Image (cartoon, rainbow, N blue to C red):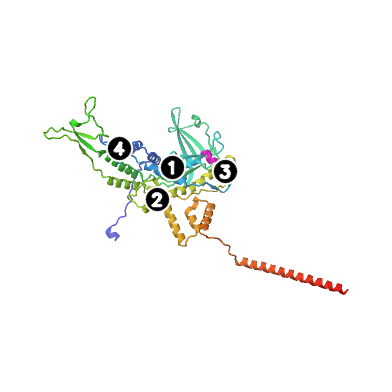
Amino acid sequence: MRSFLKLEQAQPNVITITEAMTFEDNAAKNQIWYRGDSYELDQLYKQLPHSNINFWGATSTPGQEIRKIHTGIPGLIVDRLVDITLHDMNDLDFAEEKQGNLWEKIAEDSNFHDQLQEAIKDSLVMGDGAFRISFDPKLTALPIVEWVGGDRIEIIYNRGRLKEVIFRTHFTEHRRSYLLEEIYGYGSLTYKLYRGETELDMSATEYTANLVDVEFDKSVILCLPFKIYTSPKVKGRGQSIYDRKTDAFDSLDESWSQWMDALRSGRSREYIPENLLPRDPYTGEISKGNPFDHRFIKVETAMGEDAKNTITLQQANIPHESYLSTYVTALDLALQGIISPSTLGIDVKKLDNAEAQREKEKATLYTRNAIVTALQDYIPRLIGMVLNADSVLKKEPLQKVKVDVPFGEYANPSFESQVETVSKAKTGGIMSIEASVEELYGDSKDQTWKDQEVARIKAEQGVTEVNVPSLNEAANDFEIEKEAEDAEDGDDRTEDLSHESEGSAGTSTDSE
């Protein structure tokens, strides 16, 4: 068959795809979306290549400008996810109390809670970032923990393992711009100063005059990259939740702006004869309208014998239901896979019933679980790194740090359905009181409270606990009773013998 049909093997094709933006450019674009300023979005998309077909990149015809409105949904998504995650974060549980006390001092000194909030926000918006640890005896004797966003770092890997992280800081001194690179590696911290493409000595600026390279234990690195999702474009970097969603956000803004533009264009119009037009009370000239409040249109005065000069009012018919359906569909696509509309306080009950809303709430739960999993992995590593950095500074041996990061249950609107499910299982006899309390409250309550709650429920239901003796206990009780009876019999025999001895003694006396 091959020789008859002369089949030739396919030749590999060369396909070249040009990426639109680098990781840093994409991070900057996502930051503008998070800021939520329509003026900034308009400037951004007019500078991006091939963005003239987007709503924010399009330019209106002169004289027919439309108002571009930003809904602010991208920023609200990130803020709510950060709030519902950190709100349920409980106190850290250390295996050693001494380590916990030291971390509390460091966390309070570095304002770690706010930095953790910033880290989650930047990771969701830009993709990733890194914590770095530094020392400044002029400020504090404790290690300083700082968060740096992903747009200011470069992460270098060696065969999938972290090699070093480069932190870049731009600053201006004496009207000149400089770039400082802080290279954090295992056992080393080095600095490089640039002005343009030229490398300078560290003493060239006052800002870097006191910075010197440092070497320490090769097993310790004083930084930790943090990410929630993994980027499919840049290996080893994080992915923003805005990636793959910016077009949906653009369409959402377009649908809302179109609706509002239709409302403005569909305002009522008054057709007024010239002799009835409003005039300036001082000059007598006809008042001029503007595109915003232009409500009347001049018509010629009727000059007929029976003609009447009347004002005619016309109102446009705006298809509100069509605009609403378009807006809800665009909103659904923008939030799909990230967060539930009900989490943001959006009421779409006109299209969804209560059961559908509870199912959509799972999207928020899945995203929150991804954030919680990342925090439970990275926070213990960061704390161990900080405490060991303090040990290196004090020239003490490295220590093993064990810490647990507990999170409470997400109090979503479907808690009622969870209560209903647990109640059915309890009534059906397939779940105990202890299991039902544990399922309902989980980590949101400590074990002591849950034990007390179980005891209260049992007391209200009239359930009492009675210790049932085992066979061994019964045998032991029988042996004890038998020993007691033997002891009583022995006492009785002793008394009888004593009486007999007294009687014999009396007889011998009498005989004498």
Q: Callout 4, which amino acid? A: Arg
Q: Which one is in front, 190 or 28?
A: 28
The image position of residue 469, as x and y in percent, is 60, 65
- Residue type at the position of mark 2: Glu
Give the camera-side residue of 106 and 86.
86
Magenta segment = 98-110
Q: Earlier in the sequence, mark 1 or mark 4?
A: 4
Which residue type carries mark 1?
A: Lys
Look at 37% across and 52% down and name the residue there: 354
Residue 67: assigned label: 4
Work out whether mark 1 precedes mark 3 in sequence or the reverse, and give the earlier one. Answer: 3
Query: Badge 3, how many Cα within 10 Å: few under 14, some, many 20+?
Result: few
Judge from the rendering whether residue 468 lies leftward or rightward of residue 354; answer left or right.
right
**First along the sequence among labels 4 and 3:** 4
Side of 86 where 331 appears, left or right: left
Q: Residue furthest bottom?
A: 511
**Numbered-mark total:** 4
Q: Residue at x 42, y 53 (%)?
A: 416
| Residue denoted by label 3 | 101
Amino acid type, residue under disc 3 in the picture: Asn
Residue 102 part of the magenta-drawn span: yes
The numbered mark at residue 361 is 2
Between the residue at mark 4 and the residue at mark 2, the CA separation in whole angstroms equals: 33 Å
Q: Are marks 1 and 3 in contact (CB under 8 Å)?
A: no
**Residue shown at 45%/37% (left/top)?**
168
Q: Secondary structure at mark 3?
A: helix
Q: Position of residue 330 (x, y in %)?
A: 32, 46
